[in-house]
Each structure stands twice: as structure tokens, then as C-alpha cells.
Amino acid sequence: MRRLKYEDLKNIVIGATLLGSGGGGSPQNGFQLVEEIKKIRDSVTLLEMDDIKESMHIATVAGMGAPLALKEKGFDKEAIYAFEALEELYRMAGIKIDALMPVETGGFNSVVPLYVAASKNIPVADFDGAGGRAVPELGTLLYQLYKIPSSPLTLANKSGDTIAVWLKNPMDAKMGEEIGRHITVAFEMLSGIAGWVLSGWQAKNYMNPNSLTNALNVGKAIEDAKKKGEDPVKAAAETLKGYVLFRGVIKSIEVKTVGGFDFGRTTLEGIDEFERKEFYIDFKNENMIAWKDENEPAAIVPDLICLLTTDGTPVTNADIKEGMKIGVVGFPAGKKWREAPNFFDVWRGILKNMGYDGDYIPIEKLQG
């Protein structure tokens, strides 16, 4: 157990933006929530895996909505109202929710449960539902792979209007997402969402530990490197035993929006040790596959393909622009991804649309 102070929370936003693999929400909203936390209390309690008792109940809290709505309206009470509704549902069933957790790692969604925890004075657990990265769909969460039900879900807007959702098939994450997105449209493109209550036993057996600690450590490493005039790209990679996949200038970004998701390709022209080379990253909100050449992958989801400017600012795919100098860093997916039965099946359809019809190859092998 540890206490996360103000500087820790800022470093979490920085590190989680990187580890979000191109997604996970805007760090601008994450930093805004950190300032709100600072007004409420001086620290948030973080439970490590050893602190989790098997009888505990841990709820997921997140934000859902359009990036423009988040930027214009900000985000705060939506998540509190959604959690309070979920808390009431479980209270009626005689179950107390003991802690919160993020749905994924990202500059925004890593911080939402920290904000709610500060407001409700409860702890946050050091793992998330996506195994230490961000994901494009609810069906690509670890919850789905390990048969943790999606419902009941609760959604709320800034006014406190709240809707509870029960799915006929509690494992039907696709339907949960469809309903959630329609409700979010009705809530003017912005809602808090809560659900996926898991037991401490499930957490110990199915969740990757240390997602918030990893974000904190890599965020601090990036900031320390910048202060010392060292290479933040290298520092980020070394902190979590990753790889510098490429350094380059963004030559082009091709994007099309289909069904509420951004599909696209980022092309980079090499600089420094990668001069005269090109590198390609295909994304569906998050980065799915990186290519050394048109037919030679450099990293494949669920391994992490992460972006930061060469001077040390992590960026999402919503932030990147042509001409930007970028370092691409890759990290191995957590053990619980690779241990899950048929884990790669949830990614095959996405990758096939990007021209990859092969099997999963670990980043260690591709970079070996």
C-alpha cells in the first residue's frame, strides 16, 4: 500500500499517456482531474496486489465520450454519479465495493478512478481491465478473455441523470458498448461509466499487477531525463524493459472514421540511427501493428506501440501531426494477456483489416 501524492499523480498522467499506445484519452483531461484531486485531499491510497483480499469487491470507473466534448466541457461529476449508482445496486444485494480500478491505462482513463476515489475516500487498486494498455473496444479487455461479466453497468451525465444497464448475456461486451455509446450520445457525448465488479480472487488470478505504478515510474523517468538533458525516448524504453523501435519525422497520417473509431496509418521517415528508413503504424484508435517494412512487422498488439516526441512529450493518435519528431517505443504485453486462452482471437479481425493475417509474434522475437 502506498500514498499517491500530487507529483505522483502528474507523473501517472505522463506515463499513462505513453502506455496508452496511442489511446486512453487526452492527458489534458487527466491533468485537469489531478488538479481537482488536489482540491479534495493531499493523496490517494493505492492498493498493491498483496494488499488485495480475495473477498474484496473492486469496481471499474471510466469516462466515455467524444474527445471534443471532453475538451470543451471537462469531466468530473459524471464518474462520481455513475459510481454512486453502481454502489447502490450492489448495496441492495448486500455487497460493499471496497476499491476502484481503471478500465485501461491512458492519460485520461487512468486518472478517472483516482478522482472518484479521492471524492469518496476509498482506495484504488494497482491494475486495470486492459492489462496495462488502452484498447479500442470493450471486447478487447482482459475482462472478456477471463469471463468477467460486463453488466450491470451504470452511466451518468454531469447533471446526475443515471441509467443502469443489464445485458441478457452478461458477457456480451459488444452490446454493452453499443448501448453505452447510444446513451452517451443522449448525454451530449459525455458520460461516466461504472461496472465490471470483480472479486479480489479474480483480481489476483486474472489481472496484470502494477499498471499505475508502471505509469508513474515511466512518467518520472521521462521527466527526469528531460531535466538532466538526457534522452527521454531511451529512458522510457529502459524503465520498463522495452525497445526503441524507431525515431523519425511524421511524413503522413491517413485517417478515416468508421463506426465511431479512427482507423489509419502513420508513416515516419527515419532520423538519427534510423536515417533513410521508413516505419509504418496502423491504428484503430490505439496502435495495433507497426511495420519495419511493408511486409515485416516490428510489433503486434497486444504488445504496446507507444509514441512520444523526441524531446519527451508522450502523445496519443489524436495529438500527432505531420512534421512532428517522434520516438516509437515498444513494450511486451503483460503475462495475463499471453496466458489467456486464445487471446489473439480478439485482435484478428482488426488486424486483418490492416493487412495482417498471421499469428501473434512476441515483440521480443521481432526485435531479437
Image: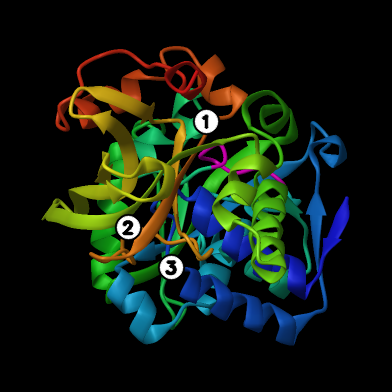
Q: Mark 2 or mark 1, which has the lower sequence index? A: 1
Task: Tell me the residue that label 1 is attached to.
Answer: 148
Residue 129 magenta: yes
Eyeballing the image, is 126 above or below 304?
A: below
Q: Mark 3 or mark 2, which has the lower sequence index? A: 3
Task: Tell me the residue that label 2 is attached to.
Answer: 317
- Tell me where the magenta segment starts and ends, as one range: 126-132
Label 2, label 1: how many angstroms apart (C-alpha)? 29 Å
Q: Residue at x 18, y 56 (%)?
A: 253
- The amino acid on which the numbered mark 3 sits, given as a three-letter code, is Ser
Q: Secondary structure at mark 2?
A: loop
Question: Of 123 and 294, which appears nearest the observer?
Answer: 294
Q: Residue at x 26, y 65 (%)?
A: 323
Q: Are marks 2 and 1 in contact (CB under 8 Å)?
A: no
Label 3, label 2: how many angstroms apart (C-alpha)? 10 Å
Label 1, label 3: how many angstroms apart (C-alpha)? 27 Å
Q: Quadrant of residue 209?
A: top right
Residue 198: image x %, image y %? 63, 37
Question: Of 90 and 37, which appears nearest the observer?
Answer: 37
Q: Secondary structure at mark 3?
A: loop
Q: Residue 48's mark?
A: none
- The amino acid on which the numbered mark 2 sits, given as a three-letter code, is Asn
Magenta stretch mostly in which secondary structure?
Answer: loop
Residue 40 magenta: no
Can residue 187 be seen in the rendering of this structure? no
Task: Tell me the residue that label 3 is attached to.
Answer: 26
Nearer to us of marks 2 and 1 is: 2
Question: Of 355 and 174, which appears nearest the observer?
Answer: 355
